[in-house]
Image: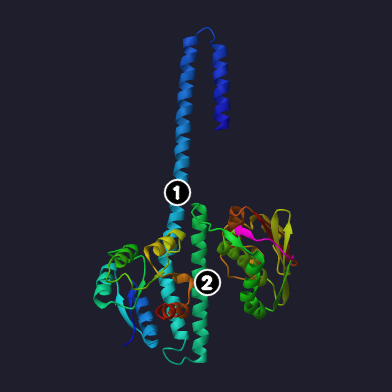
Amino acid sequence: MGIIIIGSTLTAYAIGTRYIEEPELVALIILLITAILFIIAVIITRSFERLAEASRMKSEFISVVSHQLRSPLSNLRWAIELLMSGRLGKIEEKQTEYFRILKENSGRMGELVSDLLIVSRIETATLPQKRKEISLEDLIKKLISEFEPFAQASNVEIEFKSEENLPKILADPSQIRLVVENLLDNAVRYIKDRGKVKMLLSRRGQNLYFEIEDNGVGIPKEDQKYIFQKFFRSENILRYQTQGSGLGLYISKAIIERSGGKIGFKSQEGVGSTFWFTLPIK
Amino acid sequence: MPKTILFIEDESALQKTFGEILKQEGYEMIPALDGEVGLRLAKDKKPDLILLDLILPRIHGFDVLKKLKEDKETKEIPIIILTNLEGISDVDKAIELGATTYLVKAQYTLEEVVEKIKKTLK
């Protein structure tokens, strides 16, 4: 569009200079050029409107499909739970093994659907934030206790250090929990064999600063610029671990930025990654 | 006499699962597959508790909830919303209309829902 405007201006100038003796002709040509520019502008505006409409429809489609998927998923999950509870009769060890596989996979599908719904809400700016005063330290400690069985099963030790007397922050607890959960899950999941996850919470000026360091597989340098894009999964992660939707970090970034904070990372392939975020105290 | 629970839910698979587990817990479950039948059964049977989905055929769950709470015959019956809608506005609206508890299906295990039912019926 810029090139068209510059071209039209130069043409109008050239015509004006060339036919300076015939002002009616110059006026007519400039009027004609203006009309053409106006038509081009209308076409471009309509194209943008159509693009915005397509994007909105895509997000709505994701939202409707996700809702429709949730009902059969709940039926499936609860039916499996009923079977596994032994309430319908004793189940053999071999059967339990396969019921567990069914349960885990229905759980994964459920998480993917939830992530898709959040992404759709982020993109349509309809993700509500119910902010209240929360202690980030308590939230992290609670999450660690829930993660302990998974960490132990993965031979991963979790260490958490927090500065004393940290102030509370004003944020949506369920959303901040989701961010820490995503980061902690990634840190534990991508450690090969045995490892350690170190978490740190401190005050930096008017912000709380959270950091999580792992000695996992790390992110290849060429993939680092894409890491917060939705559905992106690093090549070495795909080789090592097939689970995951590639939505966790996209969602985390959106939540932290909507809460007034910043998020980032540093990573080296084969050495590990450190993710961090800040959240404003007031 | 076992306590009765009216389950207004259009998913028959879920009706079956809950029918089984609630029977084992000593309750009698009355199934209703749409809002209209649910309203009629609530008036006829006067259950001790109503489990109510929101996305229902014929009459939407919010309208069922509103009508139940406006009717003097049914307004005292505790109502647990069991749905997949999780918007804050949906939760606020249901509580404002008089629901006792709001449970999002994706966030609870079967046993946790049963525990909520037991607690409400105590």
- Quarter of the image where the N terminus of chain B is located: bottom left
Question: Where residue B103 sits in the image (x, y, percent)?
Answer: 44, 70
SS assignment for the magenta stretch, majority:
loop
Contact flag, marks 1 and 2 (Cβ < 8 Å): no
Of the pair A156 and A190, the residue shown nearer to us: A156
Query: For numbered disc 2, what is the local secondary structure?
Result: helix
The stretch in magenta equals A163-170
Is A82 placed above or below B100 here?
Answer: below
Question: Where residue A102 sits in the image (x, y, percent)?
Answer: 49, 79
Residue A171 falls within the magenta-colored stretch: no
Amino acid carrying label 1: it is: Ala
Tell me which corner region of the image, top left, top right, bottom left or bottom right, holds residue A77: bottom left
Of the pair A150 and A92, the residue shown nearer to us: A150
Using the image, tell me which numbered label, if any, was put on residue A108.
2
Query: For numbered disc 1, what is the local secondary structure?
Result: helix
Q: Is residue A70 visible?
A: yes
The chain identifier of the residue carrying mark 1 reads A
Question: Where residue A95 sits in the image (x, y, percent)?
Answer: 49, 88
Q: Is residue B16 left or right of residue A192?
A: left
The chain identifier of the residue carrying mark 2 reads A
Q: Is residue A232 visible?
A: no
Task: Please tell me which residue is depicted at 49% across the width and 70% down the height of the picture.
Answer: A110
How far apart marks 1 and 2 lie (CA) works out to 29 Å
Task: Please tell me which residue is depicted at 58% across the width and 70% down the height of the picture.
Answer: A243
- Quarter of the image where the C terminus of chain B is located: bottom left
Tag 1 residue:
A54
Question: Where residue B98 sits in the image (x, y, percent)?
Answer: 38, 66
| Label 2 packing within 10 angstroms: few (<14), some (14-19), many (20+) | some
Amino acid carrying label 2: it is: Arg
Looking at the rendered structure, whether the residues under marks 1 and 2 are on a common chain is answered as: yes
